[in-house]
Image (cartoon, helix red, strand yellow):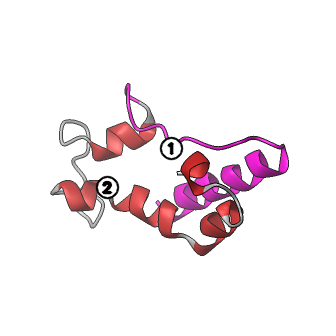
Amino acid sequence: MEEIKNEFVSAAELYKKAGCDGIELHGAHGFFLNMVASPLSNKLGDQYGGDINGRLLLVKKIIKTKKFMEEIKNEDIDNWI
């Protein structure tokens, strides 16, 4: 999960460098973040499974990553989160 988190952060950096106005952490329609958040598909027995707090831990870690926050610094935060 650490590698996946780092890939999301790297993607935010690339999008900003490309001049995009914002990003979306898409967590619906069967995409990865949706699968991790869903009790139907997430049967992990570690910190990333279990209750809703565990299932959303990856998203929380992505958003709270210092590098991710640096990428949205000095920007209109409503466009980035």
- Does 69 sit above or below residue 55? below
Within-10-Å neighbours for mark 2: few <14, some 14–19, many 20+: some
Residue 47's spot in the image, x, y percent? 27, 67
The residue labelled by disc 1 is 25
Look at 23% across and 61% down and name the residue there.
53
- Magenta-drawn segment: 1-30
Q: Residue 24 location in percent, x, y? A: 55, 41
User: Residue 3 — which label?
Assistant: none
Label 1 amino acid? Leu
Check the image and name the residue furthest to the bottom: 66
Residue 49 colored in magenta in the image: no
Residue drawn at 76 percent across, 50 percent down: 16
Q: Label 2 amino acid?
A: Leu
**Marks 1 and 2, the one that precedes in the sequence:** 1
Q: Which residue is mark 2?
A: 56
Q: Position of residue 1 (x, y in %)?
A: 46, 59
14 or 44: nearer the viewer: 14
